[in-house]
Image (cartoon, grey):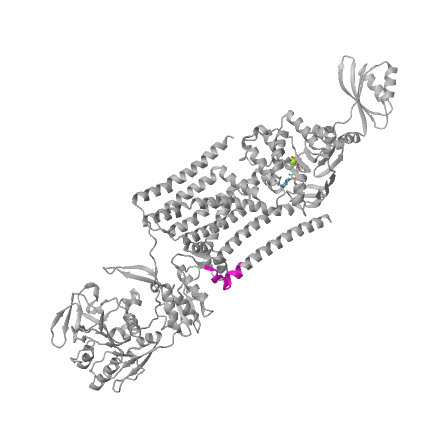
Amino acid sequence: MIEIQNLTKDYGKIRALDDVSFTVEKGEIVGFLGPNGAGKSTTMNIITGFISSTSGTVRVAGYDVLENPVEVKKHIGYLPEQPPLYPDMTVSEFLDFCAELKKVPRREWKSQKKDIMELVKVTHVSHRLIRNLSKGYRQRVGLAQALVGSPEVLILDEPTVGLDPKQIIEIRKLIKALGKKHTIILSTHILPEVSAVCDRVIIINKGRIAAVDTPENLSRKLSDFSRFTITVAGPEKRVREILQGVDGVKEVSVGGKPAEDETSFIVEADKDRDVRRPIFNQLAAAGYPILELKSMNLTLEEIFLQLTTTEAKEAV
Amino acid sequence: MKMDFFRKRSFKYGSYSVVMTVVVIAVIVMVNVILGFSGISKRLRFDITRNKMFSISQQSIDMVKSLDRDVEIFILSSESSYSNIMVKEVVNQYVVHGNGRVIGPRYVDLDKDPTFISKNFDPDQVKGINTGDIVVRSGKNMRVLNNQDFMEVSYDYYGGAQVTGLKVEQAFTSAIRSVTAEKTATVYFVSGHGEYKSDELSQLKTTLTLNNYNVETLTLTSPVPGEVDVLFFPSPTSDLLGSELENLLAFLERGGDAVFLFDVQSTIQQLPNFNDAFSRYSLQLNYDLVNEFSQANYLKENWMIRPMVYMTDVTKHLNPDQLFIYLPMSRSIGLLSENKQNLEISPLFGTTDNSTSVDLNTGAQRFGPFLLGALSELEIGLNNHSRIALVGNCTFITDDYISELGDNGSRYIVSILNWMQERTDEVLVPAKSLERPPLNMTQQSRVLVFFLLTAVIPLVIIGTGLFVWIRRKNL
Amino acid sequence: MLAILRRDFRSYFNSPIAYVLIGLFICIMSLFFVDSLNAGVANFSSNFISSMSFMLLFIVPILTMRSFSEDKKSGTEVLLLTSPVRLSQVVLGKYLAATAVFLVLTAVSLVFPLVLLIYGKPDGATLFSAYLGFILLGMVFISVGVFASSLTENQIVAAIITFVSLFTLTSFSYIGSYVGGLVGKVLNWLAFMEKYYEFSAGIIDITSIIFMLSFAVVFVFLTVRILERKRWSQG
Ligand SMILES: Nc1ncnc2c1ncn2[C@@H]1O[C@H](COP(=O)(O)OP(=O)(O)OP(=O)(O)O)[C@@H](O)[C@H]1O
Ligand SMILES: [Mg+2]
């Protein structure tokens, strides 16, 4: 549905995007993840044809953005970072305007408008001026605007910014539901959002793609060693020696002391070895019972940091 | 390599955009330039005013359509500072209808091109020309028109002048006619009685030539040839011989016209034969000298009279400023009471009540007002008239006088001749009235309307705005 | 295009701006109209005619300053430029919206000829051509204003650019007569005020109409180019 090849964007001397390529299949929900200034909004602006790229091609639904801008725009609903709202219009007037702009047939629009307003829960503010709405409601109207005409592709730049937690969850649900019919690209800083909503994550940093995969795969792939916590009843020093003595264990650190004679350790081991059995045997032999053994995969957060922070990379 | 690529693309769209912009603008500019500078534009102008303020009459259209020689129109001003929109439009009309014969208008900025006049115009024909004037030229003939020529002036009872109409078309049509006309009539200067000599009247002759009169000389010793139209007597000092009187009367009786101008003579000499001729027209030349005492009607000396110029068919086509004529040392003209049915006399010049005359023979003093010049028209047969003009002054058309006091006198003579020749240079259409449609309002309704327009309507509009705004503000 | 036209038009009339402009215009023009009333003459005085055009110098910048600047500032430019509407349609919509407001103003100002009509027999044809000239002049001015507004996101700056440009444009005939030569000729050719005065005198010149409309088209076209630049330029 969306094919992006070798996209580069220079703002004067600043290179905002550097040779970015990816594709998004029909019906996919793709998360765009990256720190501030990574180039997420820039990419989205280019896909929607709002700004130009320095080089590279963008095709949406088979049309090139540069050659056939109007065709491309027909297929896209866009919620930019700053919701494009006319403060001097009421919500209802504004959505009517968007529908006219996107040439939604009048007959369809009546019911569609109702649906959209209910979906993003702005029905009860539909006759208020956008100027007088709270930030969260404006965000919702912005989202509603993107949904007008139910375009095949939705591009949402930080759609849940400014919403309350309950709304965030609802909007996520909504996006997930929309994903059944639409192709969606959304950008966010909130990692749980990605794992909650997206089929695929594109991590972008300093204008380059750092990683592309499903959230699960990413977590798995990125852990090149397995980690787990183990709580043992016994003297800390002795237990540590035993654990470090096990073949395949790379590092042991103390994670906490749940009780007087109990110690939690974080154990990192080679990925292709299962060290759990030897640990159990040896501790059992030494007479220190294992109270808890828990596998501990990398959270997305940690992966994100690893991929995008130089210090984290050096640590690996 | 990547750099090349993006350069290429940006270049592609950039140059496409630039080329497209340039092409589109160029096409639009071209269309406008072609429209603006070709003759078409002149035909695409429409005068939609109710009284066709900027259009010319069929008479003028026919006149320019039938032109057989080129006429150029010069406006002595830069194009942008020339703001007489009516002149522009009227000239445009002549050009449009002139089948290419009427050329112009050509704007000449005299500040930029100060030698233009001396290089292109005959100084005799454009005397007193000024910035803002217009020259109509055909071959060697030219005519100067100024704003005065475009105004129809009427005088109220007290002599106050008021512009009541515009006769731009009239001025142009007669100018074009005059510069394109063949010489139509010949004026014969009569000699043999101590008249002014040819070289004392050269300015007058130039003016006559400019106005399409041939100038010849003649004596009255033999009968006046048939082709003679007008006889001109520039102040004879001795009387006609009997045979000459016969020849003159024969000429007048067949419908000939004559202009007689007599200066005051120091030698006491009667001119009974001349007076015999004049008596047939109920006019009489007196042997006196007139003095004017009304402050406004003389210049320094009481004999330097600025006469009242009567409005007649002669003055009809003169500008108000051309009526300033001084008659130095004049004699009065007497009216004979004899009432003739087929005779029509009109006064030309006169003095005020506050004037005197001294008879040079008897020394007798009389009191004014006096007539200093008159026209007399004698009906001879069906459509045949003999017209004479008799003026008790001839100095006002001499070269000496003209060099000091201007050539209004000779223009006046041309006017007399035109009247005699029934020259219809003039356009018959009336001047465009400057009268504007009146507004019939009572003081009361005027105040009401003023109040409505300045206060009520604006306040209602702004009030509506505030209402809408405040109502929406807190939505 | 219609969507944008309608929205902008409503927006003018949902805020006090259009009302204030129209109200002030009528109020100030009335003061010049009094000339005709006092003279008891059923036509527009030359003062009135020149003041009409002079007022446009102030009205148009205020009218057009928001056209694109406001959208740039509030971020709605994205909405317009990412909707499936051709850029030319966007620009045309904005241009026509401002023009429509101007036409409303013109329509309200018909109270003046109405007064003349009630109390006298004015030359209707001349009044008509005067209004035609006024509308054409307004359309030219608005095109310049919309263009200026596409250059900046600051409304005040847009208004100032517009005012200065219009002022320069209207003094072309004066400048032209000083400069002279070919430049002077071109400047004279561009002298809209002269053309406007011709119309107000009752002369309808088709070439002037074409010229003024072309001028507006050129500026609308340039506005499209300016906005389109964003789509392909490097940054
Ligand atoms: N108009 C501009 N002119 C110059 N530089 C710009 C412009 N817009 C963006 N940039 C630069 O491009 C880079 C990418 O910006 P972008 O807005 O795409 O980041 P982002 O990933 O959306 O960040 P955020 O998470 O803060 O929204 C940044 O370095 C930014 O400074
Ligand atoms: Mg961003």
Nearest the eye: C14 or B409: C14
Q: Is residue A204 above or below residue C133?
A: above
User: Residue at point 59% right, 55% down?
Assistant: B24
Q: Is residue B77 left or right of residue B366?
A: right
Nearest the eye: B409 or B58: B58
The image shows residue B368 at horizontal and vertical percentages of: 15, 68
Nearest the eye: C18 or B197: C18
- Residue B108: tell me if it is visible: no
The image shows residue C168 at horizontal and vertical percentages of: 48, 52
- Magenta stretch: helix, strand or loop mostly: helix
Q: Is residue C93 left or right of residue A257?
A: left
Q: Is residue B77 above or below residue B214?
A: above
Residue C32 in the magenta stretch? The answer is no
Q: Is residue C73 left or right of residue B326?
A: right
- Residue B285: tell me if it is visible: yes
User: Residue at point 60% right, 56% down?
Assistant: B23
- Which region of the structure is painted magenta? B32-45
The image shows residue A198 at horizontal and vertical percentages of: 72, 31
Rendering quadrant holding ligand 2 = top right
